[in-house]
Image: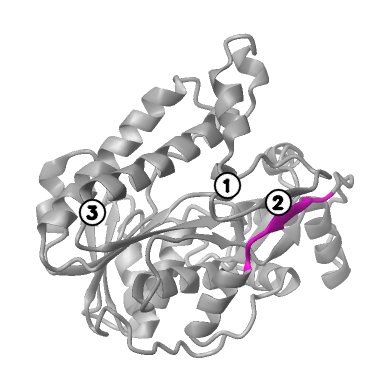
Amino acid sequence: MAPIQLTNPIIALGSLILVTGVNGLIASHIADQLLAAGYRVRGTVRDLVKSSWVTPLFESRHGPGNFELIQVADLAEPGVWPAALKGVAGIITVAASADLTSTKPVDDNVKEEVEGFYALLDVANKTHTVKSVVYTSSVWAAWNPVPNIHRVVTEKTYNDHAVQVAADPAIPQAEKGIAPFMAAKVKVEQALWDWVAREKPSFRFNSILPGTVIGPILEPDKQPASTAGFVRGLWNSDPRSLAIIKHITPLWFVDARDNARLYLAALTTPGVEGERLFGCAERFSFPQVSKLLREAYPGKDVPELEDDGWDGTELATERPLELLRSVGQDEWTGLLQSLKDTVESFEGKTSS
C-alpha cells in the first residue's frame, strides 16, 4: 500500500488514540494504520486474558512502547472511562453488539449500546484532551440490502424500512430476519447524533458506515475473523460458513486497510466534522467472490455459489474517496486484490 501522508492533522503525531474492541478485524486494522502513521494506541478489549495475543502482535509490527492494551468489560460502566481516556487525544469506537439473531426487543439492545456510548462520550466531553471522535455504524443503518432494486442513498439516508419491520407486531419474529439488528444500528447512530446536537461537545464527531469488510487477518490463528472469516470458510468449504453465506445478500465491500485509513482521515483531517462517511469501495456478492477465487486459484476446489443478483444502490462515495486520497492513497483496493491478500493471511497458517 502507498505510504500514509498526513497534512496538518488536527491531532499531533505521537498523540494517544483510544480504539475500542481492538481485537476485532476492523479495529485491529485501524490500530495498525494509526501506529503506522505515527500515533500511539490504547486499545480496549473485554477480556485481557483471551486477548493476550494483541500486544505482541502490534509490538512485532511497530516496536515496543507504542501500543497499550486495557480491559473494559462493560462499556456502560462510567467508572472505567476516566482512566481509559487519560491523555487521549482521539477516540475511535468499534466495539458493539453484533448479535444478528438476538430475540431481545430492539429498544432493549439499543438502550444497552447507547448507555455505553453515552458513558464514554460524557467522560470524553469533560476532558480537555479529546479533539476528535469517530463512531462505527454500518451500511445497514442506511439501507435495506435487497438485491436488484435501484435506490439512491445519501449521507442523510437511514434504513427506515428496517425500523418499521422490527416494530411491526403483525410480522412474526421469525420472519423479521435481521431487520431488528439493522433497526438497532439505525437507532443507536441516531441517538449519538442527537447527543452531539444536544451536548455540543468540545470535540468533533463523525461516523463511518462500512460495507462488508474483507482483508488480511492480522493474527489468523487467534483473532476473530469477522466477515473476512466467511472468505476463509468459503476457501475451506466449511459447511457452517457456507450456510451463513447463502443468506448474505449482495452489498458493497471495502478492504479492511482502506477502511482503516478512512477512519484515520476522519479522525485527523482538518475540516471533517459532523459527517457520515460510507466505507464502500465497490459492489460485491459472495457468488462473485467464489468465482474470483476459483479463477485466481484454479487448483483449489472452491464451492460454486448460485448467482443471487446485485446491489442496485447508488451511493455517495465521492467524499470518502477524497478523504482516502488525503492520507496518501489514490484509489480503493479492488475486491480481487483484497481476496488474494485475505487468503495469503491465513493459507498455510492453519489446517482448519
Q: Residue 238 or 225: which is nearer the viewer?
A: 225
Q: Is residue 99 left or right of residue 134?
A: right
Question: Which one is earlier in the sequence, the residue at label 1 or at label 2?
Answer: 2
Residue 328 image position (x, y, % from top left) = 51, 88
Is residue 281 among what the camera can see? yes
Q: Residues within 10 Å of mark 2 (few under 14, many from 20)?
A: few
Is 313 in the magenta?
A: yes
Which residue position is annotated with label 3? 200
Which residue position is annotated with label 2? 152
Residue 214 image position (x, y, % from top left) = 62, 61
Magenta span: chief secondary structure: loop
Q: Residue 116 or 196: which is nearer the viewer?
A: 196
Q: Residues within 10 Å of mark 1 (few under 14, many from 20)?
A: few
Q: Quadrant of the N terminus?
A: bottom right
Identify which amino acid the numbered label 1 is placed on: Thr
Disc 1 vs disc 2: Cβ atoms closer than 8 Å?
yes
